[in-house]
């Protein structure tokens, strides 16, 4: 054995206090490492339980079925009609009904049944209308969630001009709205 090894063995055999302290220090280190490892395992177990609970909540979440969706918003997702002209009239009727439901009035409308989108099965409509400002949000919501599925392609809003005193001119906002929908009859 080397001199260092002999010195260590002689110190341990001659001083039981030194050997006991060294034994307790090694034992405390091993217990500390075991406790840290157990704490780490329990942390991972808690994180796994939280993730599993979240996954179960997402799996159990009920998505509205087709019947519920149709009950809330009756109709079909596509424009109906034997010809593109009839589908355009159905689109105009749907938008006119939505504008009327929020208290607005249509000033002019133009249905696009000959454009490039018609080849892809879409019918377009541009409507100019007037309504109260709070009604615009209701109109857009109605168009987006109702049936058939409508896509707002253009939205231009003109608000009344301010007078010299700082009050808005009495009135309604003017809205130019471009809407398109898919026509199912072209396929």
Image: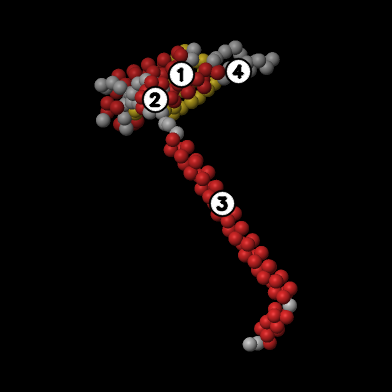
Q: Position of residue 162 (x, y in %)?
A: 63, 17
The CA distance from mark 2 to mark 3 is 44 Å
Mark 4 secondary-structure assignment: loop
Q: Where does label 4 land, which residue? A: 161
Q: Position of residue 2 (x, y in %)?
A: 65, 87
Q: Where does label 2 land, which residue? A: 69
Q: Which mark is residue 42?
A: 3
**27 on left or right of 122:** right
* Quadrant of the image occupied by residue 91: top left
Please tell me which of labels 2 and 3 falls first in the chain. Answer: 3
Please tell me which of labels 1 and 4 falls first in the chain. Answer: 1
In the image, 96 versus 85, the foreground residue is 96
Task: Write the residue at 48% across / 44% down.
Answer: 52
* Quadrant of the image occupied by residue 152: top left
The CA distance from mark 3 to mark 4 is 66 Å
Task: Write the residue at 41% across / 21% down.
Answer: 72
């Amino acid at each position: 054995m080397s001199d260092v090894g002999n010195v260590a063995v002689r110190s341990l055999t001659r001083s039981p206090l030194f050997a006991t302290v060294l034994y307790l220090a090694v034992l405390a280190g091993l217990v500390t490492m075991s406790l840290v490892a157990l704490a780490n395992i329990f942390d991972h177990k808690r994180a796994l339980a939280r993730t599993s609970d979240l996954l179960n909540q997402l799996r159990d979440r009920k998505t509205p079925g087709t019947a519920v969706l149709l009950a809330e918003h009756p109709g079909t997702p596509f424009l109906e009609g034997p010809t593109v002209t009839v589908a355009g009239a159905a689109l105009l009727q749907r938008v006119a009904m939505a504008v009327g439901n929020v208290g607005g009035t249509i000033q002019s409308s133009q249905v696009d049944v000959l454009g490039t989108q018609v080849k892809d099965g879409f019918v377009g409509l541009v409507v100019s209308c007037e309504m109260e400002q709070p009604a615009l949000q209701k109109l857009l919501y109605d168009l987006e969630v109702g049936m058939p599925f409508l896509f707002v392609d253009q939205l231009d809003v003109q608000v009344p001009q301010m007078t010299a005193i700082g009050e808005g001119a009495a009135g309604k906002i003017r809205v130019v709205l471009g809407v398109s929908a898919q026509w199912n009859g072209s396929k």
